[in-house]
Image (spheres, grey):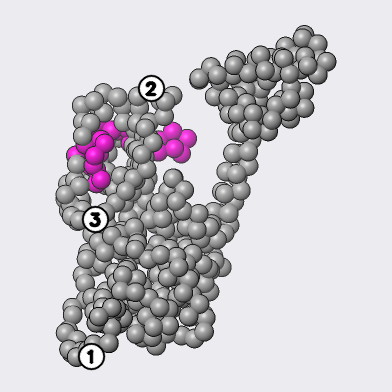
Amino acid sequence: MQIAIVAAGFTPGEADELRRAMAAWKRKGNLEKYHGKIIDGMLERNYTREFAEQIFEQIKGFGEYGFPESHAASFAKLAYASSWLKCHEPAIFLAALLNSQPMGFYPPSQLVQDAKRHGVQVLPIDVTQSDWEASLEALPGQPPPHGQPAVRLGLSLVRGLGEAAARRIEAARAAGPFDNVDVLARRAQLERRDLEALAAANALATLAGHRRDALWQAVAAAPERDLLAAAPIDEPEKPALGAPSEADDILADYDTTGLTLNRHPVALLRPALRAQRLSSAAELRDRSDGRLARACGIVTARQMPGTAKGVMFMTLEDETGCVNVIVRPELLARQRRETLDSRLLAVSGVWQVVSDVRHLVAQHFEDLTPLLGGLRTSSREFH
């Protein structure tokens, strides 16, 4: 880019366009259109045509080999640094990734599940503790595993809660603790939709108990507006509201924050899956190469790289980890709906182990999505 600017008179914007063309010229063939501008620009600056042609050929060569090589080096450095952080500072790594969302790769649910499996303590969203972003938190009297702090989930995960409201909660909390939901609503100037979003996400648990009690108190604490603002309120006695079941809590967690700190949803289905002889990711880990295997999990990723010759790679997640699945083109053609539409997928195939790399080569799919009920899940789709 610097050569194009200095030797050929390119503007910084034109040089950046040249850089983009260098990255893709083998695929799109659009680098040649810069040939005339580079040659003419260098001739105007008293370079010989022969030298200018040599420079252009070097630019083409760098675009073909040097450009991807330089990017590979940058990516390798990033991968190493990320791996080091994940290994030695997993709590910091998790908090940083959560605060960088949306990233287009792993959603918060997968990041949290993986961190928990690696010993990171993750604390729930709580208006008495959480900031807008995820934060690190020491637990007095409870040394965290491996000397790591805990990660407190941030209010940014609460669907329906804006950053402005969250920042008001932070500021009000800094002035003193909240005694109850009424005090929270008044001091943080929260509207009904803010309080209902917090209650639904179980972020009021410290002040109001379980979700159902919290929602009742949130509605009661919301200030009336307009004509009803000055109307007297005859508050009825709060009914005895039963606590949600574990399954109801998990459904609500995913619906309001996209993740849960309760058991993984597949853990609740494990007895039914075991009855169908469907193994967990942990059980498959020790299976020997070439054996038939059956697995089931929530689909978290589907990828079909252009260089894979029609092969799709899928990732299934259960309560013990992930299973990587290879889908050959003929199976994709035969079971396209199950492959592309399932959210909970059972896979039968051959287990392959090569140099500690494990995957399941699929032979048949069964869509078990109805077992999830109303659970909202998502997957990364890179086709």
Q: Earlier in the sequence, mark 3 or mark 2?
A: 2
- Tell me which amino acid carries mark 3: Leu
Query: In the image, which is nearer the foreground, mark 3 or mark 2?
Result: 3
Q: What span is colored magenta in the figure?
A: 338-366
User: Dot 2 lies on which element?
Assistant: loop
Tell me if label 3 and label 2 are in contact, CB under 8 Å. no
Residue 168 lies in magenta, yes or no? no
| Quadrant of the image occupied by residue 340 | top left
> Image point 72% across, 14% down: which residue?
40
**In the image, residue 346 lies in the stretch drawn in magenta:** yes
Q: Compared with residue 134, is residue 101 higher up or lower down, i.e. above or below? A: above
Q: Earlier in the sequence, mark 3 or mark 1?
A: 1
Image spot of residue 237 (x, y percent)? 18, 90
For the residues bearing labels 2 and 1, Cβ distance under 8 angstroms:
no
State the predominant SS element of the stretch in magenta. strand
The percent coordinates of residue 186 (x first, y second) are: 39, 83
Residue 115 image-quadrant placement? bottom left
Badge 2 crowding class, 10 Å Cα cut-off, few under 14, some 14 to 19, many 20 or more, is: few
Looking at the picture, does residue 380 appear above or below residue 102? above
User: Which residue corresponds to mark 3?
Assistant: 375
| Left or right: residue 372 compared with residue 24 | left
Report the front residue among 211 and 178: 178
Can I make out residue 376 in this image? yes
- According to the picture, the residue beneath numbered tag 2 turns out to be 309
Name the kind of residue labelled 2 in the image.
Lys
Task: Kindly report the distance in space between the C-alpha atoms of the residues bearing marks 3 and 1.
Answer: 40 Å
Residue at mark 1: 232
User: Pointers 3 and 1 in contact (CB under 8 A)?
Assistant: no
Amino acid found under the numbered disc labelled 1: Pro
